[in-house]
Amino acid sequence: MESMDRKKKIFWINLNRFDLKTDKSTWLEMAEALQSQGYDVEILTGYGKEKYYPKGRKANIRYFRAIKIGTLYRFSLLLNILTWILLNTHSRDIYILSPSALLIAPFLRLFFRSNIHLDIRSPHVDIHSWKDKLDYWIFWSLSMKLCGRLPRGYSFITERLRLAVEKEFKLGCKHYVIWQSGVNTQLFEPPTACHNQSKDFVLYYHGTISENRGVSRVVQALARLSGHYREHVRFIVIGSGSGYAKLRDLAAEEGLMNRIVLKGFLPYEQVPTEIAHADCCISPLPDCPEWNMSSPLKIFEYMASGKPMILTPIPAHQDVVQDGSFAVWTAGDSVEDFVRAIEYAYDNREKISHAAKEAAVFAREHYDWRSQGEKLAAYLRTTFENRNE
């Protein structure tokens, strides 16, 4: 009887400092979605400053200590997690690994933990320093080349990413599942009485801040708006990352410190309130391979909040929004492209705001986390449970 209960246990390994991680929602929301499908899910992870336990959440998070020095952090965290797994889990349990955690797969197999699932959310991005390059080589390239064929199951965020990974590592994944980013449509539901009380047109962005995500070009675009627009457009930026200091310096250089508000990192639970006060949201990702294969979480949250959006015409945006009238499409990802899009959004703010009401309905019908959880749960049952009967 115990083994029948235990086979529905999932251990999901995340080798990040989870309390400092910008995207917590994917793991928190999917853990709850899988729990609603009959699984007991535990996230195994590390922390930077303090252990983060979200209020009102059913997700179980187990934190492990690690050496907080460069690449040693992931190695020590992985070793501690592996030791705990071998001492406390059952051969019927399911282990969801990212490419960065894949190096423990041979040891799991050696000790009869063969229900290994590889989940790939994104290609390795944000490579800016020697440490980033070392992490890329060890926790992406090397781990995939050595251990990429050991998992029983695979999942990807998009079909484009699957094709790219298969080509790079010659995997040939015949049995896999695609589950995209999603959104908690109840948490991000548009409020009935929350309006921007100022005369400003509030443009909003949240997410990781780095040099290759296009946010700096939005700042440059604000500096190039004509006087009428520049006096009325305000840009709210929430998030952290390697490009935060440079973005702040750029805003100062452009004389925009009275027009740009950099709020830094905020807890996931506070994001819906911030979005609610925006007039228009923006996802300025440039046209490059890593973003073309992605599924940006922020646009799902913007949609669920019923907000109009300025989007670059990359496949990751087009695949989700399609021909939605609530989107203002830029012509490209240059500074001038953003200037024209921001001015258009300002001039047509009432029209796009009205159209954005359909965005919330669209998100609720197609992109709620529950539907993504159903896809992954169905695949896990077919791949692991049926084989263990």
Image: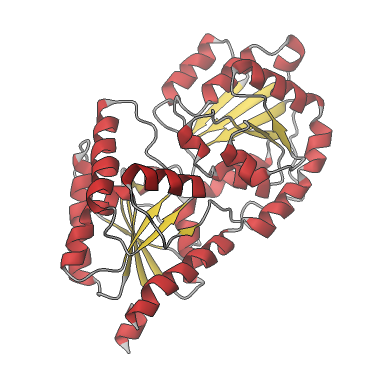
Residue 60 sits above or below residue 220 on the image: below
* Left or right of 216, for residue 176: left
Q: Residue 132: x, y in percent?
A: 29, 32
Q: Nearer the viewer, residue 147 or 312?
A: 147
Question: Would you identify the image quadrant in which residue 243 lies?
Answer: top left
Viewer can see residue 228: yes
Q: How is the image coloured?
A: secondary structure
* Left or right of 369, for residue 330: right
Residue 158 sits above or below residue 248 on the image: below
Q: Residue 290: x, y in percent?
A: 45, 36
Q: Count the labels in the image.
A: 0
Which residue is at the far bottom? 1
Q: Residue 364: x, y in percent?
A: 68, 57
Q: State the quadrant of the C terminus.
A: bottom left
At x 67%, y 42%, the residue is: 276
Question: Would you identify the image quadrant in which residue 331 lies?
Answer: top right
* Left or right of 215, for residue 305: right
